[in-house]
Amino acid sequence: MKNSSRRGFMGKAFGAVAGVGAVASLYAMKKTWDPLPSVKAAGFTTLDMSAYKENELVTEKWRGKPIFVLKQTAEMVKKAQANPKDMDRLIKVGDAHFMVCVGLCTHLGCIPGYNPDEQSFLCACHGGMYDFTAEVTKAPPPRGLDIPPFKIDGMKLVLGEEGPEYKKMLESGTTLKV
Amino acid sequence: MAHFTKATSLHDWLNQRLAIDTLRRVLATEYWIPKNINFLWAMGMVLAITFGLLLVSGIFLLMYYQPNVDLAFDSVNYTIMQEVGYGWLWRHIHGVAASVVFLIIYIHMFTGIYYGSYKKGREMIWISGMLLFVAFSAEAFSGYMLPWGQMSYWAGMVITNLFAGGSLHADGLVEWIRGDYVPAQAFLNRFFMLHVLLIPLAILGLIGLHFGALRIPHVNNQDGEEIDFDAEAKKYLAGDKAHSKVIRFANDFMSKDMMVVGIYLIFFFYLVFYHYDFAMDPVNFDPADGLKTPAHIYPEWYFLWSYEILRPFSTDVGLIAFAFAQVIFFLLPFLDKSPNAVPASRRGLFKYWFWAMLIDMIILTAMGKVPPEGVFSTIGLYAALTFIGLWIILPFITKFEKKV
């Protein structure tokens, strides 16, 4: 009896030591798989918004992801104004309106292609479609293309920093955090 | 300490220390296999040999492959394919075997389903086999990343995005798995590690479990007959080989097994030398480019059926259907409520269930390959619904099955 309770105590003591060790190792393993600080630090891109042409899609790069920039024509802005949800997605820099978003389909991450004549995006992988503000118009994508965190700085746009306009978009649910 | 005597031979020396005679008896000469089987019972050995081919060719590829986003593509397509003597041979063996191994796995699985080899004590054989299927799938996917071509990159992007869980938006989890915002150096390095160390280790362990699970219930036979292996073995050892229902695993059964393996290897090397291209997607001969998606992204043929179950639905429903398809085969021994462990042909409605499932999976595979447009989307949708429906009705049709 005395022996077995002693053995029981040793068993529990070992269990405690092993448990602490296991949790600590799992924590270290989890942290080892995290993105490196250098990867995270390289996450800013500055765009000069005066260089873009109307209704011409330009693909920039931010955090390794393609970023779509589409300067809106006056006619597109008019169309967007009819639908407040579309208008919320546009970013005003100077006097011009821009659609800036991550060019990865919100379904499974393929890159949709832009058709300037129809002013719409089509994702070839699973047939999803978006309008000129990158709002979804045909499933399977569950939502419009995500808008990256941005800060307006004169005629420049800094991607990766969260300005007040971006925070407003987050609050209103216009975009999700990327 | 045990008592050792002066050895009379090398065999005796080893036998005293490692009991090699006992080992041989237990593992080979007195491991009993039913006589009433056919060539489909050789698929296990065919798989073991194919795994061996993957291992050996992999070792040689490993000597020149560079797990670096700038070097990986050239180390495969230039160094291994053009500079290394017979490098093309190892790559083509590796690529063809990776594809063919799934064909044999599916034949092996459907043989088990047809003959009811997943019940009456054989449940752990089925479950360990399904774990092997999952491990092989992970091995195939991680290996597909390594040449770092366009299909590698975009398959990596799409598959890791599945872990965001649709509306759960677990983007943090996806970035954690990748070690970056997109598949990049950290991603390639860790999938390289998984492909050459961790998953092969798991596969080796699971193969041990799979063989171990076979030990007590023994191999099934063509009629699902319950054989008294001890009695039959006694008959065999007493010299009545003609009336015994069993034979030795080695060399008797093995000799037949290796006959099938021989025919298989001729077919296999025919593919390696003359038709290796079926296992090499042309799109993957373009280097990875994160700013350009290929026109159509589709997985290798062996994943198409589950991919097609994901595709026709909206994201969340698709993910749930996909998850269902990934785990449901594990539950087969428990969803089949009939006690009959006989060929499907004698099992009433289950016969139709078996063939319907097989044909449905072939249709799903074919639809997964074509672009998701027009009539193909519709056929794909109905085939996916049929797949789910077949699993839902399985417990009911087997519950009312007549006992044979």
Image: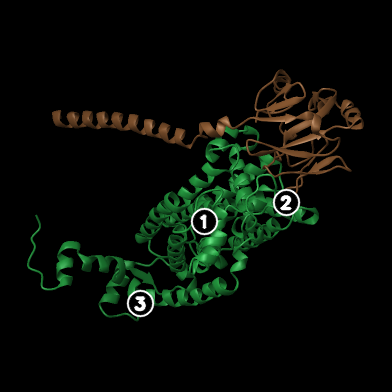
Mark 1 or mark 3: whose residue is earlier in sequence: 3
Q: Measure the alpha-carbon separation of dots 1 and 2.
A: 30 Å
**Real-space Cα separation, disc 1 to disc 3, in angstroms:** 34 Å
Q: Is tag 1's residue or tag 2's residue first in the polypeptide sequence? A: 1
Residue A59 visible in the snapshot: yes
Q: Amino acid at mark 3?
A: Asp
Q: Position of residue B6 (x, y in %)?
A: 7, 68
Dot 1 and dot 2 within a common chain:
yes
Residue at x-position 18% and y-position 71%: B11
Subunit of mark 2?
B
Write down which chain is painted brown.
Answer: A
Q: Quadrant of residue B379?
A: bottom right
Above or below residue B354? Residue B186 is above
- Which sits in the foreground, A40 or B253? A40
Q: Amino acid at mark 1?
A: Ser
Q: Secondary structure at mark 3?
A: helix
Chain holding disc 1:
B
Q: Residues within 10 Å of mark 2 (few under 14, many from 20)?
A: many
Residue that badge 1 annotates: B338
User: Depth check: B122 or A119 in front?
Assistant: A119
Say which residue label 2 marks: B381
Label the green chain with its letter: B
- The answer to whether residue B37 is left or right of residue B157 is left
